[in-house]
Image (cartoon, rainbow, N blue to C red):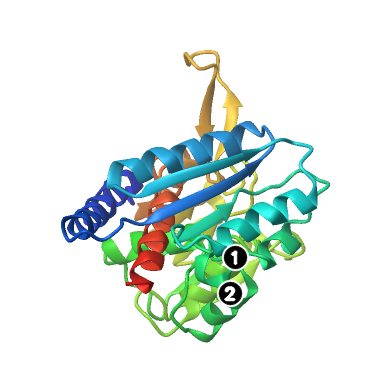
């Protein structure tokens, strides 16, 4: 078993971005600028935005966070989005999801300028992805594709099973893995909550991508010997032995599945770090599009 080490690969990507940004600054070109809108006090979202700010700083990307109160109205949020759409100094921005329940995620995403949609969620960018056109890819699938590419994982003709059909991970992942590209050219099965015989289908996968949002959903009997396993899930569970009082686990039972897999992503230290890397790559791409 070998680790698909998101920590190592994301560090490589960040060094590459840092060098490009430094070259911009040396040539008196404004560095990329990423903004984030955060509505409310969701702890996971707060942590994620703080991580984005820290990672931007580490590579020389300008980072701005717009923190709005939980009771922000739709009109107030849309004003902030409109302001960022029109600000030439901001190359890309994200609206951190999930939003409070009184706000409509889909409506908000559609109001983001597609040329600044570095999360890759706007329908225009999703459409371009489906057609294989150049666009901003959703950050998590983008990060996973980079991980597979940099480990030189052979995906052509392989049986790939994706567990979960969210528009953030599962659905775009299934599209990217089936495209005529490298990585890609896999035969993809997309499973979800209504899929019958899901364990049997998963057990046939050469490449298994778990994005169901359920802790330790994937057990050893769902994985065939030598499979490549990508774990997108991340969950906090109580653990009195840890100083923090909790530990992080994924959608995959790592301890047992790792005994059968040829490659596997750890949690933490896997896909989460690659998601940040994907976002940084999209931000650099947005800046270069203006040059």
- The local secondary structure at tag 2 comes to helix
In the image, residue 200 sits, relative to residue 220, either above or below, namely: below
Using residue 242 as the reference point, say whether residue 38 is left or right of it.
Answer: right
Q: Residues within 10 Å of mark 2 (few under 14, many from 20)?
A: many
Q: How many marks?
A: 2
Look at 53% across and 67% down and name the residue there. 173
Q: Which mark is residue 126?
A: 2
Can residue 39 be seen? yes
Is 163 on the left-hand or right-hand side of 289?
right
Q: Which residue occupies 60% across, 57% down?
A: 83
Question: Where's residue 237, x and y in %?
Answer: 60, 27
In the image, is residue 58 above or below residue 152? above
The residue that appears at 52% across and 40% down in the rendered structure is 48
**As drawn, which residue projects farthest toward the right?**
102
Q: Which mark is residue 87?
A: none
Q: Nearer the viewer, residue 90 or 96?
A: 90
- Place residue 153 in its image quadrant: bottom left
Q: Alpha carbon of mark 1 to alpha carbon of mark 2: how far?
A: 6 Å
Q: Secondary structure at mark 1?
A: loop
| Percent coordinates x, y for residue 78 in the rendering | 71, 56
Q: Give residue 167's position: percent from left, percent from top.
A: 64, 64
Whether residue 228 is visible, yes or no, is: no
Badge 1: residue crowd in 10 Å (few <14, some 14–19, many ≥20): many
Q: Quadrant of the C terminus?
A: bottom left
Q: Could you tell me residue 129's position as x and y percent?
A: 52, 78
Task: Judge whether 70 appears above or below 238 on screen.
Answer: below
Front residue of 79 and 259: 79
Earlier in the chain: of badge 1 and badge 2, it is 1
Q: In the figure, is residue 60 to the left or right of 211? A: left
> Do the residues bearing badges 1 and 2 touch, measured as CB atoms within 8 Å?
yes
Instruction: Please report the residue visible at 31 percent of the width from the left and 66 percent of the height from the top.
Output: 149
Which mark, residue 121?
A: 1
């Amino acid at each position: 078993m070998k680790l698909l080490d998101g920590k190592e690969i994301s560090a490589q990507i960040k060094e590459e971005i840092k060098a490009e940004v430094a070259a911009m600054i040396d040539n008196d070109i404004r560095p990329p600028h990423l903004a984030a809108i955060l509505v409310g006090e969701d702890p996971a979202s707060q942590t994620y935005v703080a991580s984005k700010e820290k990672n931007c700083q580490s590579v020389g990307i300008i980072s701005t966070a717009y923190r709005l109160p939980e009771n922000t109205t739709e009109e107030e949020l849309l004003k902030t989005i409109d302001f960022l759409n029109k600000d030439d100094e901001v190359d890309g921005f994200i609206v951190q999801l999930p939003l409070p329940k009184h706000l409509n995620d889909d409506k908000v995403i559609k109001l983001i300028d597609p040329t600044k949609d570095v999360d890759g969620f706007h329908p225009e960018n999703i459409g371009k992805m489906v057609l294989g056109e150049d666009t901003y890819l959703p950050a998590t699938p983008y990060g996973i594709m980079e991980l597979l590419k940099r480990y030189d994982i052979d995906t052509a003709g392989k049986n790939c099973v994706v567990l979960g059909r969210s528009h953030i991970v599962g659905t775009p992942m299934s599209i990217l893995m089936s495209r005529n590209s490298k990585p890609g050219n896999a035969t993809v099965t997309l499973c979800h909550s209504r899929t019958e015989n899901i364990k049997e289908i998963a057990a046939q996968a050469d490449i298994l991508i778990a994005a169901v949002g359920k802790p330790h959903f994937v057990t050893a009997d769902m994985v065939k010997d030598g499979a490549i396993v990508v774990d997108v899930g991340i969950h906090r569970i109580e653990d009195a032995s840890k100083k923090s009082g909790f530990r992080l686990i994924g959608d995959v039972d790592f301890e047992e599945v790792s005994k059968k897999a040829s490659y596997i992503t750890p949690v933490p230290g896997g896909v989460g770090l690659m998601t940040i890397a994907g976002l940084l790559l999209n931000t650099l791409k947005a800046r270069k599009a203006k040059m």
